[in-house]
Image (cartoon, coloured by chain):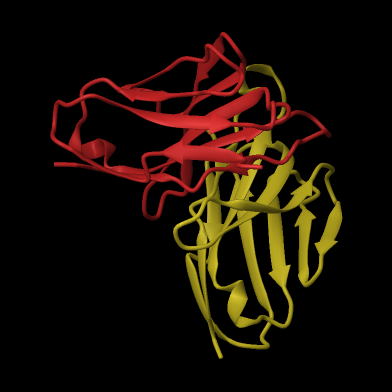
Amino acid sequence: NAGVTQTPKFQVLKTGQSMTLQCAQDMNHEYMSWYRQDPGMGLRLIHYSVGAGITDQGEVPNGYNVSRSTTEDFPLRLLSAAPSQTSVYFCASSYSPPSRGSFQPQHFGDGTRLSIL
Amino acid sequence: GQQLNQSPQSMFIQEGEDVSMNCTSSSIFNTWLWYKQDPGEGPVLLIALYKAGELTSNGRLTAQFGITRKDSFLNISASIPSDVGIYFCAGQVAGGTSYGKLTFGQGTILTVHP
């Protein structure tokens, strides 16, 4: 059982380049999300999806796009990379969204380490 | 947006010592979570808390959901070297437009000296 798979594990980009970070899960989870992790700031939610065809913005969505055409995949796109987007990106999934009294534990991928020069 | 303050930022302890860390929020949460992150990996859920005042244990770990619903603490008893890592609190604000969103604390870096 692969769980949550993120690719690539490492990437270096030049300012202005675009790229897509891939996230796939094989657990039939409805809820998927993307976070970025920066030193001293914990994890901040970028975008999330409560099911195929449904996405919404998190805390820091600017500069990122997402789509959810299938239950399994939730790619994160950087449209025009900026040095401020240098970070470690984590994708997470759970059977259902966090909700009152019935939280389903999120499974995190191992992260994509992205550097923008 | 919601703010979570986690303290301490880092801890250096001797093996066998007990550890305590906490999170406070400017908003009321209806769910508190505690995660651990090992180097090069994603966070792993340790404990989930759903009700104000709830006290939950997972082995040597104990966490409590504050009665004001604005704070939570995590205790680790008799620390061992494999406890090393970054510990995060996270919470979900009750209902409405916050549905599906978790807010994370800044993390506590734990170092355990043998």
Residue shown at 73%/29% (left/top)? A95
Tell me: A58 left or right of A78: right
Residue at the (70%, 38%) spot, across then down: B29
Image-quadrant location for residue B97 = top right
* Horizontal and vertical percent position of residue B114: 56, 91
Left or right position of A10 against B101: left
Q: Nearer the viewer, residue A46 or B9?
A: A46
**Left or right: where does residue B99 sit relative to residue B67?**
left
Quarter holding residue A98: top right
The hue of chain B in the figure is yellow
Question: In the picture shown, does residue B100 fall above or below B85?
Answer: above
Percent across and percent down for residue B47 are 75, 54
Chain A tint as drawn: red
- The answer to whether residue B100 of the structure is visible from this angle is no
Q: How many marks?
A: 0
Which percent across, then down, holds residue A1?
A: 66, 42
Residue displayed at 63% across by 37% down:
B27
| Quadrant in the picture for the C terminus of chain A | top left
Q: Residue furthest top?
A: A53
Looking at the image, residue B82 sits to the left or right of residue A102; the answer is left
Q: Position of residue A90 (x, y in %)?
A: 47, 41
Q: Is residue B9 above or below residue A114?
A: below
Residue B25 visible in the shown view: yes
Q: Is residue B112 above or below residue A39?
A: below
Along the viewing direction, whichever of A12 and B45 lies nearer the viewer: A12
